Amino acid sequence: MDVSKAIKERRSVRNFKPDPVPEKDLLKILDAGRWAPSSGNTQPLELIVVKEPKTKEKLAKAARGQSFVSEAPVVIVVCANIPRTERRYGERGRNLYVIQDTAAAAQNIHLMAYALGYATCWVGSFHDDMVAEVIEAPEKIRPLAIIPLGKPKKIPKTPSRRDLENIIHENKF
Ligand SMILES: Cc1cc2nc3c(=O)[nH]c(=O)nc-3n(C[C@H](O)[C@H](O)[C@H](O)COP(=O)(O)O)c2cc1C
C-alpha cells in the first residue's frame, strides 16, 4: 500500500470483530515498531502482546473503562525501557526521548496494521500504575500507549484536520 494512502486513510477504530490475528501478520505489525527511529538508536521499545481475555478486560478497566479495548483479539501495550535511553541521555532521554521513540514506534504499528487490513486505536487515557500492574512491568518499564488490534466492525468517518496553511509558519512563529 502507498504510504500516503495509509497515512490519510488510517482511522482510530473503536469496535472489533473477534477474528484472531494470524501470527504472521501480527509479527509484521510488531516488527514495524522495531524499525521506527529512536534517539541515538537506543531502542527503548518493549511490546507486551495480550490475548488473554481476562488480561484484556483488566487493561480496558485500567483505560478508564474503554471497553472496546477488550473487544479486540489482540491488545499491544507499547512500553519504554527507560534506562536504555536514560543511560545515554540522562534527564532528556528519560522525559522526552523515550516518549518520542515509543510514539514513533506506535505510529509505525498503526500504519502497518492498516496496510495489512486491520484496525487499531491509539489509547493513551489510562491509569499508568494499573496498566503497569496488569502487565507486571518491572520498575522503569513505562507503559505509554495501548493499541487494540483486530478487524474492524465499522470504520468511523474521517475527523477533520486543521487547514495546512494555518499550521505552517514561515521562518518564525
Ligand atoms: C496520544 C493519543 C492518545 C489517545 N488516546 C485515546 C484514548 O484514550 N481513547 C480513544 O478512543 N482514542 C484515543 N486517541 C485517538 C484520537 O482520539 C484520534 O487519533 C483522533 O480523534 C483523530 O482520529 P483518527 O485517528 O481517526 O484520525 C488518542 C490519540 C493519541 C495520539
Image (cartoon, rainbow, N blue to C red):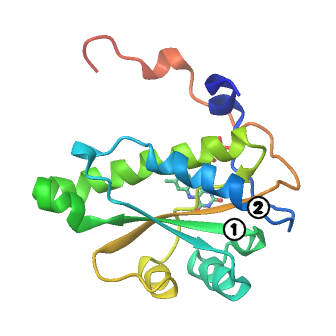
Q: Where does the image place residue 18, in percent across and percent down from the top left? A: 86, 68
What's the mark number on residue 74?
1
The amino acid beneath tag 1 is Val
Whether residues under marks 1 and 2 lie with C-beta atoms below 8 angstroms apart, the answer is: yes
Q: Quadrant of the N terminus?
A: top right
Which comes before the other along the chain, label 1 or label 2?
2
The amino acid beneath tag 2 is Val
152 is higher (above) or lower (below) than 7 = below
In which quadrant of the rendered view does residue 102 lie? bottom left
Q: Is residue 62 in sight in this rendering?
A: yes
Side of 48 relative to 13 (left or right): left
Residue at horizontal 60 percent and vertical 79 percent from the top = 59
Residue position marked by numbered label 2 in the rendering: 21
Q: Where does the image place residue 128, in percent across and percent down from the top left? A: 43, 76
Give the SS element for disc 1. Answer: strand
Side of 149 relative to 97 (left or right): right
Residue at horizontal 72 percent and vertical 75 percent from the top = 70
